[in-house]
Image (cartoon, rainbow, N blue to C red):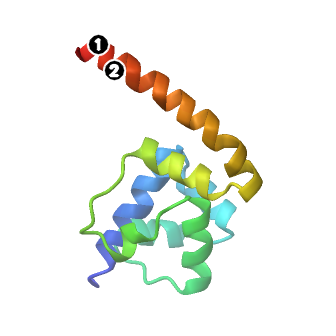
Amino acid sequence: MQSYSRPLGDAVKRARAELGFTQNQVAEAADIDVRTVLNIENYKGNPKMEVLFPLVRVLKMDSREIFYPEMRRESPAIRRLRFLIEECSEEEATALAPAIESILSVLRSKTAATVG
């Protein structure tokens, strides 16, 4: 087994589970063979870029999970939020920033009141 097989397989399996996808759904969405997904998840895959690229995008994966598995992983909620933000246009980000700041201020003041 190659040194990258386990991090790749674990990351694909985790991302697929978080999205609630079956291996068949992932394969169809990424336009790859379901056996390829199965092999990757079982640490037997050595995918070419034309397989890895759509797979990472369909599963909305952070590629650092594959190439730097020793890094601390973000929670699924933080990863989802980061992905949503990264998909925003500049205009959308500008419009969302004040709303997010306001919501965070309210949530944090409630937390402070509960703790204090």
Q: Residue at x 61, y 50 (%)?
A: 84
- Is 105 situated left or right of 28 in this image? left
Label 2, residues with CA under 10 Å away: few <14, some 14-19, many ≥20: few
Image x and y of residue 23, in percent:
53, 56
Is 38 located above or below residue 114 in the figure? below
- Quarter holding residue 49: bottom right
Label 1, residues with CA under 10 Å away: few <14, some 14-19, many ≥20: few
Image x and y of residue 39, in percent:
43, 72
Dot 2 falls on a residue whose secondary structure is helix
Which dot marks residue 111?
A: 2
Image x and y of residue 48, in percent:
53, 86
Q: Could you tell me which quadrant the C terminus lies in?
A: top left
Amino acid identity at mark 2: Thr
- Quarter holding residue 40: bottom left
Is 95 located above or below residue 4 in the figure? above
Q: Residue at x 56, y 29 (%)?
A: 102
Q: Which residue is mark 1?
A: 114
Circles 1, 2 touching at the beta carbon (< 8 Å): yes
Q: Nearer the viewer, residue 84 or 116?
A: 116
Which dot marks residue 23?
A: none
Dot 1 falls on a residue whose secondary structure is helix
Q: Could you tell me which quadrant the N terminus lies in?
A: bottom left
Q: Residue at x 44, y 46 (%)?
A: 78
Amino acid identity at mark 1: Thr
Image x and y of residue 59, in percent:
55, 59
| Spatial CA span between label 1 and label 2 | 5 Å
Is 89 located above or below residue 76 in the figure? below
In this orientation, does residue 33 appear? no
- Is 2 situated left or right of 14 in this image? left
